[in-house]
Amino acid sequence: MSVSRRNFLAGAAAAGTLATMPRILQARCTLRVAVINDEISQDFDRACSVAANDFGLHWIELRGMWDKNLTALGADDIAKARKILTKYNLRVTDIASPLFKSDWPGAPVSKQSERRDQFKADFDFKQQDALLEHCIELAKTFETDRIRCFDFWRLDDVKPYRAAIDIKLRKAAQRCAKDKIVLLLENEMSCNTATGEEAAATLKAVPETNFMLNWDPGNAATFPKNTSLLNGYDLLPKHRIGHCHAKNVVRKPEGKWEWAPVGTGIVDWTAQLKALERDGYSHAISLETHWRGAGTPEASTRISMQGLKDALAKAGTGC
């Protein structure tokens, strides 16, 4: 079977070529290489075309489209999205929902709650149970068994509320289990589980087997104290990792940081991928570049995808 290759403009900041990945991955690749759709474009057809035809992917992660959060789509939009996925032969890794990205009731208002981008979603605490039910239905509709969540906007002192937050997460996981769905907690710098150390503690406190981690070493790397090679990966129970986001950061003076393309920055993605393969990880590696240095989301994502593919090749994953 011959495989076509394309050349394309990488973006305003850099130009180059990116050979497309074969749509049929090599036999030894056990990873679901993916990209979050709205990191490419709000035009869902365009995002899927780039993912499938230019990046050569089988998988895509859903977060938002047509200037709406996925959880705000109407029935017509959902039907349209499903047709587009079929058109490009793409499967959904997970529902990248904003579940539990809200203030914890009774706690001081988080410094993060008014400033963080929720990707066109805005749900308060009282709406979270209904949002969970909606996400379960979306997961069924898009034929995935995974829903991403968080653990509320980060508090300066979470200790008085941590036990109650963990109970909330346990109940949500138990609800998901009824429909055989995995609830993925993302370690997010603006939420109460941000680092590898915090993720390990939360996983211990929420022992449900369908409650797993969406490991994001780039998010963990935004914390200056994370100086280990893989930003706390060594602390995690590896069998509890159920999804992984790929991005990178660079450190700036006075403890500040900025997003960076995969292939540069703090996170050694070749080492991270080798560690994941060593530990038997077989779920998604989903590109969430966040970096916009090439001028547009699509151009920037193309550069980061090349960096991720380079890391996959160097790690010897067979992908």
Image: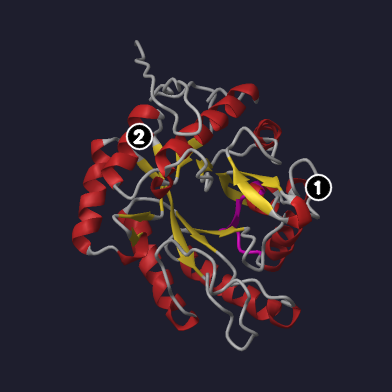
Q: Secondary structure at mark 1?
A: loop
Residue 143 falls left or right of residue 200: left
Query: Are circles 1 and 2 on residues that touch, CB within 8 Å?
Result: no
Whole-angstrom CA distance, mark 1 to mark 2, is: 35 Å
Side of 182 where 133 appears, left or right: left
Q: What kind of residue is marked 1?
A: Thr
Q: Is residue 38 above or below residue 285?
A: below
Residue interval drawn in magenta: 207-217
Residue 134 drawn at (x, y percent)? 36, 68
Reply yes or no: does residue 214 show up in magenta: yes
Q: Is residue 162 above or below residue 182?
A: below
Instruction: Please state which of residues 269 and 239 is positioned toward the viewer in this rendering.
Output: 269
Q: Position of residue 202 (x, y in %)?
A: 69, 65
Give the labeled residue for mark 1: 227
Residue at the (39%, 76%) spot, across then down: 130
Scheme of colours in the image? secondary structure
Q: Residues within 10 Å of mark 2 (few under 14, many from 20)?
A: many
Q: Residue furthest top?
A: 2
Q: Earlier in the sequence, mark 1 or mark 2?
A: 2
Q: Quadrant of residue 309?
A: top right
Instruction: Say above or below: 232 vs 105.
Output: above
Residue drawn where x is 71% and y is 41% of the image: 266
The amino acid marked with disc number 2 is: Val
Query: Residue 50 shows which numbered tag?
Result: 2
Residue, x 50% and y 29% (percent of image)? 14
Helix, strand or loop for disc 2: helix
- Rendering coords of residue 157 (x, y %): 74, 77
Between residue 177 and residue 104, name the one nearer to us.
104
Q: Residue 152's mark?
A: none
Indicate whether residue 61 is drawn in magenta. no
